[in-house]
Amino acid sequence: MNLLANLNRRKNDFLKKENIFYFLIMLALFSLDRFSKSKIINNFNESTYYINDFINFDLIWNIGIGFGLLSSDSTLFYSIVTIIIGLVILFLIFIFFISENMDKIIFSIIIGGALGNFYDRIIYKAVPDFIDIHYNNFHWFTFNLADIFISIGIIIFIIRSFVIKY
């Protein structure tokens, strides 16, 4: 009986009006990321597309995690990393549910981006990165919109955790 009552309470938490708002934020960020990646994947030839002196679009398939870390040709290693990423996303969703409303927006941004990259890992077996920021011969790591969302969420989380106290 305790388990059923707990599940019913969690279902009610899930359907709270403010949680639906945050899930819509996650969905919007996920959709924006998917739209940008599908445009690049479907309409991109193998050459670099120059936008200006600082930004190029250059499709790179990333089999690692952020910045190409943990890249490996091993299918087993890739699968283990993907499972760990999935578990981290589930943990973030759990943290989302127990967080205050101020923090839920932060977790919505991070989870929306993380789901975009996780989707690519499952469907394409790699994440399409295409935004190349550079200055002269210095190039930053190639990234995508999901990476931007994750980074913004983490930066806001750090500021919120260490600088802004309420």
Image: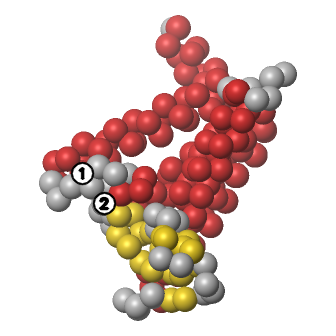
Q: Give 158 or 76, whichever is nearer the viewer.
A: 158
Mark 1 secondary-structure assignment? helix
Q: How crowded is mark 2: few (under 14 residues within 10 Å), some or many (20 or more)?
A: many
- Residue at far right of view: 166
Give yes or no for contact between labels 1 and 2 (Cβ–Cβ under 8 Å).
Answer: yes
> For the point 42% across and 78% down, which residue is it?
59
Q: Tag 1: residue type?
A: Tyr
Percent x, y for residue 17?
78, 38
Q: Tag 2: residue type?
A: Ile
Check disc 1 and report the residue beneath it: 78
- Residue at far top of view: 2
Quarter holding residue 56: bottom right
Check disc 2 and report the residue beneath it: 63
> For the point 16% across and 48% down, which residue is it?
76
Q: How crowded is mark 1: few (under 14 residues within 10 Å), some or many (20 or more)?
A: many
Mark 2 secondary-structure assignment? loop
